[in-house]
Amino acid sequence: AAGVIQSPRHLIKEKRETATLKCYPIPRHDTVYWYQQGPGQDPQFLISFYEKMQSDKGSIPDRFSAQQFSDYHSELNMSSLELGDSALYFCASSLGPSSGSVGNEQFFGPGTRLTVL
Amino acid sequence: GQSLEQPSEVTAVEGAIVQINCTYQTSGFYGLSWYQQHDGGAPTFLSYNALDGLEETGRFSSFLSRSDSYGYLLLQELQMKDSASYFCAVSRTGGFKTIFGAGTRLFVKA
């Protein structure tokens, strides 16, 4: 079965650089979530999109932005990178309310490991 | 604010039953989910409760009491491969923003 695809899987950047992470949800999933997970930490909700509109916002820094495109893939743009941004970034997808689903079974991608030097 | 509490570590032997508790404080509660995560892997959905009661899925069961803001995950017939971190997660009204607990590390011993 198709799963959530994230690219790149690994990314190394210098401080103050920018990074773009991409997420391709499971076909027919209209909701995408982004999470940040530091070593030994729980996943921290950053932002979510439903039907290409931002549906909720969490602890996403102002230096980060995200969007969901017409084909439902999503991109997380990170600027002015800091050492503390080094983490695993997960994208998850789910069926949204329009499908009749409560949308709470989230399918996670393999993650992008970002290292800021 | 929103917060979830779960034990940091639990150790059990193969074949045993273990219960991982989760208490939460949140506004606009929508449902309680459970995820499993192996080291270096992605979280995997296990179970979800929106209403009070027990949900059973194979060896895993999850319980919710909304009046007590409490839930638990029950793992039966433990196997070595169940050694992982287990997170409870609360979705608030609307179902999108999901807050994870700090996770419970389960060690299964032979």
Image (cartoon, coloured by chain):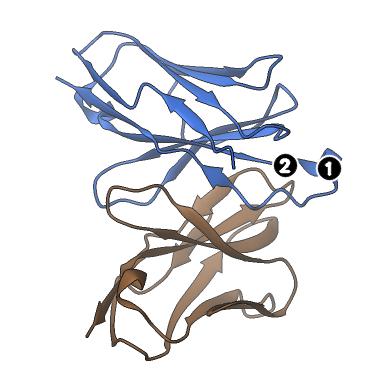
Chain colours: A blue, B brown
Could you tell me which quadrant the N terminus of chain A lies in? top right
Residue annotated with mark 1? A99
Name above or below for residue A98 compared with residue B73.
above
Q: Is residue A104 left or right of residue B18?
A: right
Name above or below for residue B64 compared with residue A43.
below
Residue at the bottom extreme of this rendering: B16
- Residue B73: percent from left, percent from top: 51, 77
- Residue A89: percent from left, percent from top: 38, 33
- Residue A33: percent from left, percent from top: 57, 35
Name the residue at 46% across, 78% down: B21
Name the residue at 51% across, 73% down: B23
- Residue B92: percent from left, percent from top: 66, 52
Q: Nearer the viewer, residue B92 or A117?
A: A117
The answer to whether marks 2 and 1 mark residues whose Cβ atoms lie closer than 8 Å is yes
Secondary structure of the residue carrying tag 2 is loop
- Label 2 to label 1: alpha-carbon separation: 6 Å
Q: What amino acid is found at the position of numbered circle 1 in the picture?
A: Ser
For disc 2, the neighbor class at 10 Å (few under 14, some 14 to 19, many from 20) is: many
Q: Is residue B55 left or right of residue B44?
A: right
**Which mark, residue A95?**
2
Q: Is residue A21 left or right of residue A113?
A: right
Q: Is residue A54 left or right of residue A87?
A: right
